[in-house]
Image (tube, rainbow, N blue to C red):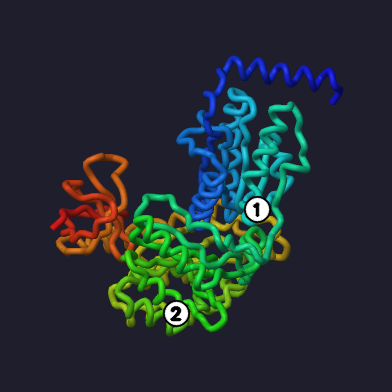
Amino acid sequence: MSEGLLQLGRRKLAEEADTAGPAPAGSQLRLYIETYGCQMNAADTDLIAGLFARGGWARAEVPADADVILMNTCAVREKAEEKVFARAGELRQWKRKKPGTVLAVTGCMAEHLKDKLLERAPWVDVVAGPDSYRRLDALVTRARQDLLDGEVRAESRIDVRLDRNETYEGLDPALGGDGVSGFVSIQRGCDKFCTFCVVPYTRGRERGSSPREVLRQVRALAEAGYKEVTLLGQTVNSYRWEDVRFSDLLRAVAQVRGIERVRFTSPYPIDFTPDVIAAIAEEPKVCKHVHLPVQSASDAVLERMRRGYTIAEYARLYVALRMAAPDIAITTDVLVGFSGETDADHVATVEFMADARFDSAFMFAYSEREGTLAARKLPDDVPDALKKRRLAEVIALQERVSAETNASFVGRRVRVMLHKQSKRDAEQLVGRTDHFRAVIVARGAHKPGDLVDVEIERSTGATLFGQVV
C-alpha cells in the first residue's frame, strides 16, 4: 500500500469515527462473546472473559456496544461451522459502523480451519485456538491498533499453536453462567482418536490439572456463592494424576464446603471403572446422572468408529450403573449414518435405544470432518436422504421415551436446585433435579441457589412443572 493510500485510509477511518461519535473519556474497552458448542466451550468463554476482565476490559451485552466481538466456536459437526460462518457475516456490520472493532474467532473451529477460515471470511481479524487464550488480549489489542492505523497484518492474526502443557493452571475458575452452577476443567484434549472425531486435532492430546489445582478452583467457586460444580473433560473419567484416580477426585470435590452438587461430563465408556460407579452411588452430593455416549449399537459400526467397546460391553456398564444407583438418569449420544452403516446396523441402534430407554439423547447425522481418519480412509457412503430418515426415526423414538419418563414423575416429590429466572415468565424460576431434569416453579419467595422440594404437577417431553412444598 502506498503512503498516499495509507493516509487516505486513516482519514476515512477518522471521519467514520467522528460520525459514530467519540467514546466517553476514560471509558473501558468492551468485549462481547457468543458461545457455540459444548460445556467445555462455555467454560472457556468464562475463562476468556475472566482474562479480559483482569486486563481492564468490561463486558458488552450486545455486539453494537463492543470493541471486540468474539465467537467461541465448535468444530465437531459441519452444521455448527456453517452456523458460525453465517453469524460472522451478520456481525461484520458492526465493524463497518464502528471503526476499530475487532471480530475474533476462537476455539475448536479456529484450530480446525486455521488460515482457511480467513480465506472464506477475510473480515475476521483474529483466529485463536483453545491453547491461545492467555495471548488473546494481546492479539486483539494488536489487531485493533492495526485496524485504526488502516493496516492489515495477516501474520499477526492467527495463533493456533497447540500446547501439551497448557491446562490454564493458576487462573481463577470460570465465574459465569447463572452464578449457581460453575465449571472446572480438570482435563483438556483427548487421546481416543475415534475415527469420526476432530477433537484430538483441535484440542490436542490429553492432559490434566493437578488435584490441588482442581480443588482450589472448586473452593473459589464455592466462595463466590456457587452451589453446584461440573467437572469437565473430553473423556473426563480417564483422569489420573499420579496415584489420584477420577473416583478419588469426585469424592474430594464432594467434601468442599458450600458445594451441594457435583456433576461431570463427558465420561468415556471404556474408562468407567467400578470405583467410579461406587463413588456415584455412595456420595450423596455426586449427582445420579451419567452422560454415556453409545454412538451406535452395531459392533461393526463401533469398530469402524474405533470406539474400543462392543455393544455387549456397553450394555454391561449400563446395567452396572443402574444396579448401583437404581434411580440414576442415563443420557447418551447417537450418531446415525456413519460410513458403511446398513439398515440392519440402524435397526440394532433403534432396538437398543428402545430397550435402554435413555432419559434423553443428543442425536446427529454423521458429517465428515476434514483431517479425521474417517475422512481420509472411510467413504461417506450413506446418502443424505437416508441419514435424515434414520435420524428422524431415532429422534421420534427418544422424544416418546423422554415424554413417558417425564410423565412418570407427575405426583412425585423431587429435590430441585433453582438456577435462574424463566425466559418466558419473570415470576417463574427454572431449576434442575439431581437427575438433570428441568423443573419450573413459581418464584414466590425463592431465589436462584435455593434447594427446594417440589411436587410435580404436569410434564412435557423436556420439562417438569411443579409446586414448591
Question: Would you say residue 131 is visible in this rendering?
Answer: yes
**Dot 2, crowdedness within 10 Å: few (<14), some or many (≥20)?**
some
Q: Is residue 121 visible?
A: no
For the point 77% across and 37% down, which residue is it?
A: 153
Q: Horizontal placement of 308 versus 163: left or right?
A: left
Q: Residue flagged by tag 1: what amino acid is it?
A: Ser
Q: Residue at x 41, y 50 (%)?
A: 177
Residue holding disc 2: 248
Q: Position of residue 27 (x, y in %)?
A: 52, 29
**Which quadrant does the N terminus fall into?**
top right
Residue 30 - label: none
The residue positioned farthest toward the right in the image shown: 2
User: Judging from the image, what secondary structure is the residue with disc 2 in?
Assistant: helix
Alpha carbon separation for disc pair 2 and 1: 30 Å
Give the residue pinned by disc 1: 132
Q: Position of residue 255 (x, y in %)?
A: 35, 73
Instruction: Give percent across and percent down for residue 20.
Output: 57, 18
